[in-house]
Amino acid sequence: MRLRMAFGKKDDAKYIAHLDLTRVFERALRRAGIPMAYSEGFNPHPKISFGSALAVGVEGEREYVDLELKKEDDEDAAAVMSALQGQFPPGITLLEGRVMRPEVKPLMAVLNLAVYQVRLPLAAPLPEESLREAILSWLSRTQVNYLCFSKKGRQEKDIRPWVEKMTGSVQDGWVALDLEITIGNQGSVRPEEVAASLGAMENLPLTLGEMRIRRTGLYICHNGRRRTPLENSDGAQAGGSAAVEEGKEREA
Amino acid sequence: MKNATNAAREDIRPRVERFLAGVQKPSRYIGNEWNVTRKDWDQTKVKMALAFPDIYEVGMSHLGMRILYHRVNHHPEYLCERVFAPWTDMEQKLREEEIPLYSLESFQPLRNFDVVGFSLQYEMSFSNILNMLDLAGIPLYAAERGPEDPWVIAGGPCAYNPEPLAPFIDFFLLGESEEQLLAVLDLIAEQKRQPLPRREFLRRAAQVQGVYAPELYQVAYQADGRIEKIERADEEVPDRIEKAMIKDLDEVLFPTQPIMPYLEIIHDRMTLEVMRGCSRGCRFCQAGMVYRPVRERSPETLWRQMDALVCATGYQEVSLTSLSTGDYSCVQPVIRGILDKYKDERINVSLPSLRLDSFGVQLAQEVQKVRKSGMTFAPEAGSQRLRNVINKGVTEENLVEAATAAFKAGWSHLKLYFMIGLPTETREDLDGIAALVRKVVDIGVKSGRRNVAITVSTSSFVPKSHTPFQWEPQDSMASLEEKQKYLKERLRDRRVKYNYHDVQTSFLEAVLAKGDRRLAKVLLLAWQKGCRFDSWSEHFRYELWLQAFQEAGVDPHFYANRPLAGDDVLPWDHLSCGVDKEFLIGERDRAMQEVTTPDCRFGECSGCGVCGGLGVDIDLKG
């Protein structure tokens, strides 16, 4: 059985590194007594795959994971989820799940849009109007070079193509940015890089050291239409075990 | 009065969270793992911080930490929380932001606890103890601490010679602490109700088996630097402190709901402790002396603990630990029981420290379905003569037999551990290492294995207290380096990889292992100059240690490289693990005569003195 679930990764759980999250799921499944399917080969490992890696310290409101379980009965989805939820450390909350047909493409291959909310304190007062203008000015650029330091050393990359949308507001000395960023195997840009670039290019008094980032959603975007990996291609929401049969029919 | 309240914890947490995402591996510093114990700070009578002077991944792998954490928290009125040495990036942040070192469970500053208890696993972690106390804002010297400060205590193998730490620690706990520590916490609870003067309290604490308060003992020195005498400063405390120990391993609490770390730790698996103690009697080995006698845990207890561990952890691997698991009399039935019961769960068994013989290979074969890792053997010395000197009861035939069996069973990668610089070692013994390695390579090639790979590791002999070799000098650094070079030349083969330990680290380890109270000043100076994480090669700063020795006017070679006489007063003469000094002298003499002493489990009593003296006996279950 292939179970796709949406979950939140918040509070202390935001400090769990992406590679460690697989272990957290694996151990929770084992404690819950839910039999996992294993990969073939020399060193078999359970088939747990996440949609998109979340950086350490970033909260995820709605992340996605696919589990391959050694269970035949598709009606078990709700029972699996409630058994599993009882075995998670604080901060990890299962939100919704659905049994997927085996031929459905993996999350990693289909998710192509991430939505972030970035909050950062202002070092000096800033009228909201100025923030809006700055964002428009940044977005109007055809190319935005950003200097990053990676293992390969100093590297300049154009980050503009990855930013689909950016809006912002000012409240109580904090700036809130809403970002929509293209993700996938072609590469991407990190939300903190966009915020840093905005501050530098448009001369905004942003304090980068205390940035708080939340990823509010991950989507599959096609021809201007957007859906979650738990929705069918026609946009209908399917959730819980009752929706499972219906979903199968439509995809067939 | 400790009146730390929720205010303190609410203060630290948000301040840490402001930068935590920017440090390496932040889940080291956040707590809140699965199976963590959270107790109400205000409702518990005694609050203890269990402190491990190394990073989270190392400390969390240590069984003793787990045992004591659960033992203390098992008591309804006592609370135990954890703290580890912050890695250097985190230390820098804590210092910049002026945040005191805090416990992982409730983010309480360490100084709000009644007791801070350090685990002493290796000498090279000593500088981290000072660093952690300093980060906590606790005065380093016991003499500078007042009634407002926590009791700073310490236990673990290095407590058998804790003298370099003497002025920093209020009292040490010798031996196995499960019962002893609770007795100490009872006294601290009493002390909070009705405070006694410090000296009075220490005198009471010293009545608990294995408790050693250094300030109740005075050391006098001779003009040449040797110790003249060690005397108690108080009539009411014992002349010699005898270790505490657990008589029956089936009767003692064992943690079956261990904390599940988020990040991968060094030993990231379930642990079953099958026995304590080892009576093989290797003459260099401190653990083999101080954990005597051998006491086994029954298979029934182990299986019961296993069931609980599987349910509580979700781990897929269990390690059967002890000093020499192949010697556990019920090892085969225990392994079979586990493998049979948990076939469907795909649970693996790992066996550290197997004996070098075909039985060891047979056991390894039973538990290892996929031959993923190498097989490790520890002949320790290259010639039969030298193996007799160190009482490592293995022969070349054992190794040949074991290597043949291992290659036949499908292993192609073997690891061989040796020691260099052992007492009486000559060129022939080094040549013996090279010859033995060549022999193993040949066996591998003849067995038809492709990709035969042999990793040879040498460590440098470090004389340790409470062993027959405690009187022996360490080989000089120049000589050890020359021997490493000699071996490197003789082990040149594309199938052989040779690793060796840094001699400066081994030298400092010897200095601290055989050190006395005069080293405390050196330790303080070295820490002030920036030494910490000395067991991490990227942080070990030998030149700073040398400066510290020079400034303190202490000659490190006096400790590491000077042979001691049988009638010399040793810095640890007042501390006893139950093994008689006469036995150790006898063993040293037998070593020089190249005579072995058999394991008392299988033959006659060798008269080490433990069984009679401590009211404990060998306890075998098979």
Image: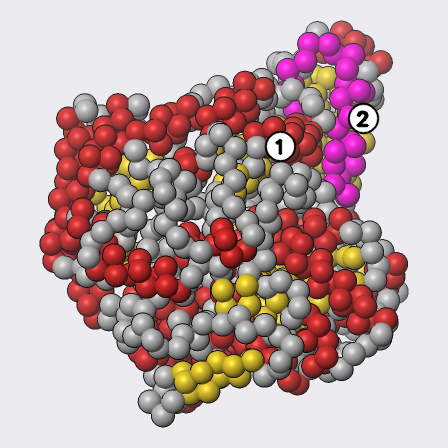
Residue at 46% x, 35% y: name it.
Answer: B328
Q: What chain is tagged by disc 1?
A: B
Q: Which mark is residue B301?
A: 1
In which quadrant of the rendered image does the N terminus of chain A lie?
top right
Number of marks drawn: 2
- The answer for how far apart the CA atoms under marks 1 and 2 are is 33 Å
Residue B242 in sight here = yes
Q: Judge by depth and name the residue closer to the eye, B355 or B415.
A: B355
In percent of width and height, residue B453 lies at 24, 37
Q: Judge by depth and name the residue closer to the eye, B110 or A223.
A: B110
Q: Which mark is residue A82?
A: 2
Quadrant of the rendered structure where residue B6 is? bottom right
Q: Which residues are magenta?
A: A66-94
Q: Which mark is residue B395?
A: none
The three-letter amino acid code for the residue at tag 2 is: Ser
Q: Judge by depth and name the residue closer to the eye, B454 or B281.
A: B281
User: In the image, is residue A229 above or below residue B423?
Assistant: above
The three-letter amino acid code for the residue at tag 1 is: Thr
Q: Judge by depth and name the residue closer to the eye, A117 or B348.
A: B348
